[in-house]
Amino acid sequence: MTQRDVVFPPGRQALYEHNRYSPAIRANGLLFVSGQVGSREDGSPEPELEAQVRRAFDNLNAILEAAGCTFEDVIDVTVFMVDPQAIFERVWNLVVSEYWGQAPHPTVTAVGVTWLYGFQFEIKVIARLPDAA
C-alpha cells in the first residue's frame, strides 16, 4: 500500500487525529481537502452563521497554505448546508465576494443536508498543486 501524503495545517493535528481523518491528501498533482467546518481550535462550532462560514474558509485556507496552495488553485468545490433554502444566498454572497475574487470561479456543487455534527456549513475542495501546474 502506498503511503498517503498528508497535509496538516499548523496547530490542528491533534484534532484531526482525534477524529481519525486526514485534512488533505496530495495525489497526482492535486490536493484533496476534507470537508472543513467553522470549528474553533478546540473543535467547537462558531455559533453565528457568518462567523462559522468565515472560520470554515480560514480553516480551509490554513490547509491550502500548508500545501503551498491558495484559493486561486481551487478547481472544484462542494458545499454542504443545513437548511440551504434559508441560508444559501447569505452564505454564497459572503463566499463569492470575500474569498473567490474575480471570475473565473471554480466549479461548485451545493448539497442540502440534515446534519453536520452541530455545524450549519461545510466545504470541501480539490485544488491543483502549484508544482503540478
Image (tube, grey):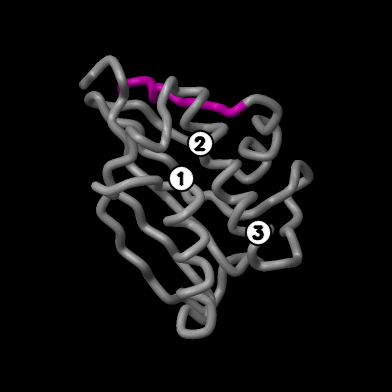
Residue projecting furthest to the bottom: 85
Sequence-first disc among 1 and 2? 2
Q: Position of residue 94 (x, y in %)?
A: 52, 60
* Magenta region includes residue 8: yes
Is residue 115 depicted above or below 30 in this figure? below
Please state which amino acid type lies under the numbered disc 1: Ser
Disc 1, disc 3: CB below 8 Å?
Answer: no
Q: Which residue is mark 3?
A: 52
Q: Which mark is residue 34?
A: 1
1 relative position to 100: left or right: left
Image quadrant assignment for residue 10: top right
Nearer to us of marks 1 and 3 is 3
Real-space Cα separation, disc 1 to disc 3, in angstroms: 17 Å
Mark 3 crowd level (few <14, some 14–19, many ≥20, 10 Å Cα): many
Sequence-first disc among 1 and 3? 1
Is residue 81 depicted above or below 94 in this figure? below
Mark 1 crowd level (few <14, some 14–19, many ≥20, 10 Å Cα): some
Please state which amino acid type lies under the numbered disc 3: Gln
Q: Quadrant of the C terminus?
A: top left
SS for dot 3 = helix
Please state which amino acid type lies under the numbered disc 2: Ser
Q: Which residue is mark 2?
A: 22
Q: Quadrant of the N terminus?
A: top left
> Front-most of 96 and 3?
96
Real-space Cα separation, disc 1 to disc 2, in angstroms: 7 Å
Is residue 45 depicted above or below 128 in this figure? below
Image quadrant assignment for residue 51: bottom right
Q: Which mark is residue 71?
A: none
Point 45% across, 23% down: residue: 67
Disc 1, disc 2: CB below 8 Å?
Answer: yes
- Magenta highlight range: 1-9
Point 52% across, 23% down: residue: 66
